[in-house]
Amino acid sequence: MLFNSYQFAIFFPLIAVAYFLTPYRFRWALLLAASYYFYMCAIPEYVLLLLSATTIDYCMGRAIARATTERGRFSCLIVSLTANLGTLFFFKYFNFFMDSVSAVSGAIGVPMATPSSSWLLPVGLSFYTFQTMSYSIDIYRGQLQPERHFGRFALYVSFFPQLVAGPIERSTNLLPQFRQNFDFDYERVVGGLKLMAWGLFKKIVIADQLAILVDAVYSSPEGLVGVHYVVA
């Protein structure tokens, strides 16, 4: 579900209205369900990756805080970093790495058949990977106490407004907001809608139209001259 799609134009107002109609203590559950639905609109199976990253870093965050030795705390941090970076490497860089190995082996006269992955890159993988890693690192550095509420932590990892396009939010900034009681504020809502409308204008009217010209150059660079590249 793209932010500039008809589906999101229906999804977002419904969730916004439901949010203000929902009692404070249940709002985190509404936002979590909405975030997981939003994520599953791409490739539903990949929600298991999101859930596993959430579970690992939730457990490792609490383990870091409970550890009584520096070695124990550091070991838990390494588990978190390894799980996150390992997943990111496999989906984003595995084929590139294997192709590089094959090219190098061929160049030195030792041809090697290397495996490749046909898995598609999960939506938002880089964003939630670095977001959960920053959470573990903040706890390790003593800048944050681990979140005890698994649901609110899962919402921090999957919060749909910034899940697929960022920014990467620090836990010290976003997590506390899920415990605050926000009442409907007309001025704040109107201001937010104006920002969204301006962003959609820049995306749909400006960027998407310029992309027609830019993509034409990038897709067929043969026969073009320097000025075309500069303009593109």
Image (cartoon, helix red, strand yellow):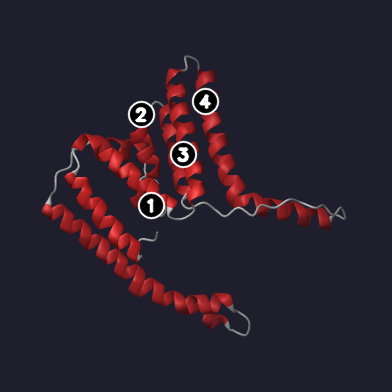
Looking at the image, tell me whether mark 1 or mark 2 is earlier in sequence order: 1
User: Residue placed at 30% from the left, 70% from the top?
Assistant: 201
**In the rendered image, which residue does mark 2 sit on?**
147
Mark pair 1, 2: CA separation? 23 Å
CB-based contact (under 8 Å), mark 3 and mark 2: no
Q: Is residue 167 visible?
A: no
CB-based contact (under 8 Å), mark 4 and mark 3: no
| In the displayed structure image, the side of residue 137 where residue 113 appears, left or right | right
**In the rendered image, which residue does mark 3 sit on?**
51
Looking at the image, tell me whether mark 3 or mark 1 is earlier in sequence order: 1
Of labels 4 and 1, the one closer to you? 1
Mark 2 Cα-neighbour bin, 10 Å: few <14, some 14–19, many ≥20: some
Mark pair 4, 3: CA separation? 19 Å
Numbered mark located on residue 76 in the image: 4
Mark pair 2, 4: CA separation? 16 Å
CB-based contact (under 8 Å), mark 2 and mark 4: no
- Figure check: 158 above or below 146: below
Of labels 1 and 2, the one closer to you? 1
**In the rendered image, which residue does mark 1 sit on?**
38
Q: Residue furthest top?
A: 68
Looking at the image, tell me whether mark 4 or mark 3 is earlier in sequence order: 3
Q: Is residue 99 visible?
A: yes
Q: Position of residue 107 (x, y in %)?
A: 82, 58
Q: Secondary structure at mark 3?
A: helix
Numbered mark located on residue 149 in the image: none
Q: Amino acid at mark 2?
A: Glu
Figure quadrant of residue 178: top left
CB-based contact (under 8 Å), mark 4 and mark 1: no
User: Residue placed at 39% from the left, 44% from the top?
Assistant: 158
Mark pair 3, 2: CA separation? 16 Å
Mark pair 3, 1: CA separation? 14 Å
